[in-house]
């Protein structure tokens, strides 16, 4: 036997509206049978509910048999809260861990061109490829997923050349020799001077391509996955030019360069100053207007530029390791936040085919060691164009 209570009249709805915290609570209480005090009297009977008659316009009409309490619910509800905007989807991966094939081979070779991948091209997207992609992404402020999306692939293609099929399958095919043993002249002088800039050629610049030059070229080629023939093809020459600058007349004729105050910023000519020119890619150590030491330098990329202006050496660290990039920064002399003048093994190996994270890179190890020993905290650092 069913026991039912029917709430009489609109007054019951008013009671619900006042008592509940909101529209959702109203619906829930009506559906669960919660009953505030009715305005009119009600009877409890066995069977269908009836309401005692009352006089006046406000009297309730008896409910027909089988009518439910839902007839007394509000017919309209407050608008629901707007849904939260969907979270942006992660970029779709073009290549990711576990993939195999020619596209992975191309990816690995392009990464290797930038020294983000080492070893044999395998065509399998494994842990070493993930690490290379993540490092490439981190340096370029791309989401570090370790998978290749459109943004990563576009950036990588912009910075590299399309590898040949032979290169993607680890087949080193030499190009036609441009310079080789027996060659002579100004082109050989330039070759020897450029090799000397990055530490591959130990002798005097002679203009004659002999065994010493061939050995230097062979070592340079082997380290860069170029067929190590000892002869210079176009690929070898392009890579060497990208890593070096045009030799000076002094370099071409074995004359020791003398540091000059000509062209230095006026701020460098008083006191003790590390004078850094972005126009000439050079650092000159100047004391009381007299240049003491000159070295080649490179700077940060467009994404992470080296700041320009007048600074002071804040502190020095002989064996520093970056806490952000986890790379070595030997003989670091910090002048602006995390930016420092320091030795760069990468600059020594790759030359200008690369950039720093904003620091002033030096590739002359003996020169930076000497500079580190002379510079004091508080000395000026002038970076200008």
Image (cartoon, grey):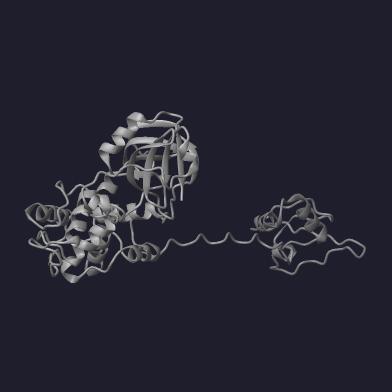
What residue do we see at 17% from left, 51% from top? 205
Q: Is residue 69 left or right of residue 192?
A: right
Q: Quadrant of residue 171?
A: bottom left
Q: Is residue 30 left or right of residue 42?
A: left
| Residue 346 image offset from top left, x and y in percent | 28, 47
Query: Quick one: quadrant of the N terminus?
Result: bottom right
Q: Is residue 321 above or below residue 2?
A: above
Viewer-proximal residue among 76 and 194: 194
What residue do we see at 42% from left, 41% from top? 275
Q: Is residue 335 above or below residue 109?
A: above
Viewer-proximal residue among 255 and 281: 255
| Residue 237 image offset from top left, x and y in percent | 21, 62
Viewer-proximal residue among 235 and 3: 235
Q: Is residue 297 left or right of residue 65?
A: left
| Residue 160 image offset from top left, x and y in percent | 30, 64
Q: Is residue 168 left or right of residue 342?
A: left
**How many numbered marks have been drawn onto this rendered protein structure?**
0
Is residue 266 something one can see in this rendering? Answer: yes
| Residue 278 image offset from top left, x and y in percent | 42, 50
Is residue 337 something one can see in this rendering? Answer: no
Viewer-proximal residue among 303 and 311: 311
């Amino acid at each position: 036997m069913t026991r039912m209570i029917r709430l009489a009249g609109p007054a019951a709805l008013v009671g619900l509206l006042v008592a509940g915290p909101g529209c959702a609570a109203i619906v829930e209480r009506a559906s669960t049978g919660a009953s505030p005090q009715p305005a009119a009297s009600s009877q409890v009977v066995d069977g269908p509910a009836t309401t005692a008659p009352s006089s006046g316009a406000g009297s309730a009409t008896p409910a027909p048999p089988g009518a439910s309490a839902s007839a007394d619910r509000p017919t309209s509800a407050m608008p629901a809260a707007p849904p939260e905007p969907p979270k942006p989807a992660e970029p779709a991966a073009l290549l990711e861990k576990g993939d195999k094939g020619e596209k992975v081979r191309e990816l690995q070779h392009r990464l290797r061109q930038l020294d983000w991948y080492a070893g044999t091209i395998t065509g399998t997207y494994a842990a070493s490829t993930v690490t290379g992609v993540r490092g490439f992404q981190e340096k370029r402020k791309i989401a570090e997923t370790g998978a290749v999306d459109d943004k990563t692939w576009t950036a990588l293609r912009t910075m590299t050349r399309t590898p040949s099929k032979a290169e993607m399958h680890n087949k080193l095919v030499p190009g036609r020799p441009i310079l080789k043993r027996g060659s002579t002249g100004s082109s050989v002088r330039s070759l020897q001077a450029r090799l000397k800039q990055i530490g591959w050629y130990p002798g005097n610049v002679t203009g004659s391509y002999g065994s010493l030059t061939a050995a230097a070229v062979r070592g340079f080629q082997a380290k860069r996955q170029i067929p190590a023939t000892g002869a210079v093809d176009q690929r070898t020459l392009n890579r060497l030019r990208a890593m070096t600058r045009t030799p000076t007349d002094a370099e071409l004729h074995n004359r020791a360069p003398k540091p000059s105050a000509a062209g230095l910023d006026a701020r460098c000519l008083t006191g003790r100053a590390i004078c850094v020119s972005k126009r000439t890619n050079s650092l000159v150590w100047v004391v009381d207007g007299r240049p003491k030491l000159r070295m080649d330098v490179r700077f940060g990329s467009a994404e992470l530029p080296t700041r320009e202006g007048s600074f002071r050496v804040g502190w020095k660290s002989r064996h520093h390791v970056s806490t952000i990039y986890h790379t070595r920064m030997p003989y670091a002399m910090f002048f602006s936040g995390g930016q420092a003048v320091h030795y760069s093994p990468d600059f020594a190996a790759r030359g200008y085919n690369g950039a720093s994270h904003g620091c002033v890179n030096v590739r002359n190890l003996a020169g930076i060691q000497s500079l580190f020993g002379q510079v004091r905290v508080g000395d000026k650092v002038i970076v200008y164009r």
